[in-house]
């Protein structure tokens, strides 16, 4: 079921299937969120839960049991119920199912709130441990943004960081099933990074600097762009479909990483896990401001 949100002339749409905000139009009618295209990437803005990226051979050991898992987990495939709604905000909630318990053997509640702010939107994830045992999880966003916008070209855009940081590369997986991810530094210390198709053809770019809180995607030609505040997420990733010349860039705040080279293969050993004891909740959010 699709839900329409409106505020100060802006219009957005969310979906109870997957719980994602999949459309945002400015008061001038310009679409900001990528709408999906099977020719390059049919996704739009999925939630990543309870893991980020892939694991070796798509199998991980969770709670002492080897389990086959999908890339980015199952949060994007769940059906959510509406628990609160106003003209410009909606809260959606999903709980464990027979399938999720076969993969991730703990009861949970995952609430996703989307709210228009007047300058853009905020998305909040709240996970609650509704069971009787402690568990840990990863969570992240995968926001597809139209790039270029208007009369700009992809190469007119740049990423701006508030302080110099190392940009890392997760190379494109070349095996039929994912191997453990390797990584290397693509740029050692930069405050800005010009978009080039060739960079993204190599793989996913990411920052691993928990002290950073914002990133800006801006056109040098028109000045159009977005700023994301992602306080609380230690990883920020950037991706577009390699070799496709697709008109989008994903800005992805992560609390977790794909299975990296040298990991044990046990889910409970992964870095950046968020632990929850029974009855405990954790909320994280990101804000997108459009200019």
Image (cartoon, rainbow, N blue to C red):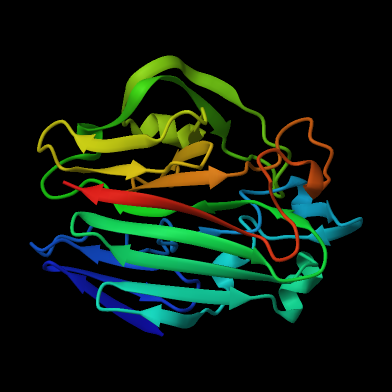
Q: Which residue is drawn at 69% across and 75% down?
A: 96
Q: Residue furthest front?
A: 279
**Rendered view: 166 above or below 228:** above
Judge whether residue 247 can be spotted in this image.
Answer: no
**Quadrant where the image shows the N terminus:** bottom left
- Residue 145 lies left or right of residue 223; in this view the side is right
Q: Which residue is drawn at 75% across and 58% down?
A: 277
Task: Give 90 or 12, whichever is nearer the viewer.
Answer: 90
Q: Which residue is drawn at 77% across and 72% down?
A: 101
Residue 30 place in picture, x, y as percent: 15, 60
For residue 161, what is the image quadrant?
top left
For residue 38, what is the image quadrant?
bottom left
- Residue 267 lies left or right of residue 224; in this view the side is right
Judge whether residue 242 can be spotted in this image.
Answer: yes
Residue 162 place in picture, x, y as percent: 33, 25
**Rendered view: 277 above or below 103:** above
Q: Which residue lies furthest to the bottom in this view?
A: 1
Q: Which residue lies furthest to the right in this view?
A: 64
Residue 189 place in picture, x, y as percent: 43, 14
Q: Which residue is drawn at 25% across and 39% down?
A: 154
């Amino acid at each position: 079921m699709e839900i329409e949100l409106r505020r100060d002339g802006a219009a957005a749409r969310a979906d109870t299937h997957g719980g994602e905000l999949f459309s945002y139009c400015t008061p001038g009618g310009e679409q900001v969120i990528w709408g999906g295209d099977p020719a390059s990437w049919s996704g739009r803005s999925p939630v990543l839960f309870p893991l980020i990226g892939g694991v070796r051979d798509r199998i991980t050991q969770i709670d002492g049991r080897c389990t086959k898992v999908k890339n980015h987990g199952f949060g994007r495939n769940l059906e959510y119920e509406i628990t609160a709604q106003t003209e410009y905000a909606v809260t959606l909630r999903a709980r464990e199912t027979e399938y999720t318990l076969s993969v991730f053997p703990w009861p949970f509640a995952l609430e996703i709130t989307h709210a228009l702010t007047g300058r853009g939107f905020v998305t909040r994830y709240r996970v609650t441990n509704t069971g009787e045992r402690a568990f840990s999880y990863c969570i992240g966003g995968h926001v597809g943004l139209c790039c270029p916008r208007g009369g700009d070209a992809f190469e007119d855009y740049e990423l701006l960081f508030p302080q110099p940081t190392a940009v890392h590369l997760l190379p494109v997986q070349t095996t039929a099933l994912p191997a453990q991810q390797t990584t290397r530094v693509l740029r050692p210390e930069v405050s800005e990074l010009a978009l080039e198709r060739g960079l993204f053809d190599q793989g996913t770019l990411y920052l691993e600097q928990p002290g950073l809180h914002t990133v800006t995607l801006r056109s040098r030609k028109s000045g159009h762009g977005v700023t994301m505040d992602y306080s609380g997420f230690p990883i920020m990733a950037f991706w577009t479909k390699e070799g496709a010349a697709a008109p989008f860039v994903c800005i992805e705040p992560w609390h977790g990483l794909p299975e990296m080279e040298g990991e044990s293969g046990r889910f409970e050993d992964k870095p950046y896990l968020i632990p929850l004891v029974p009855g405990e909740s954790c909320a994280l959010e990101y804000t997108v401001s459009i200019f």
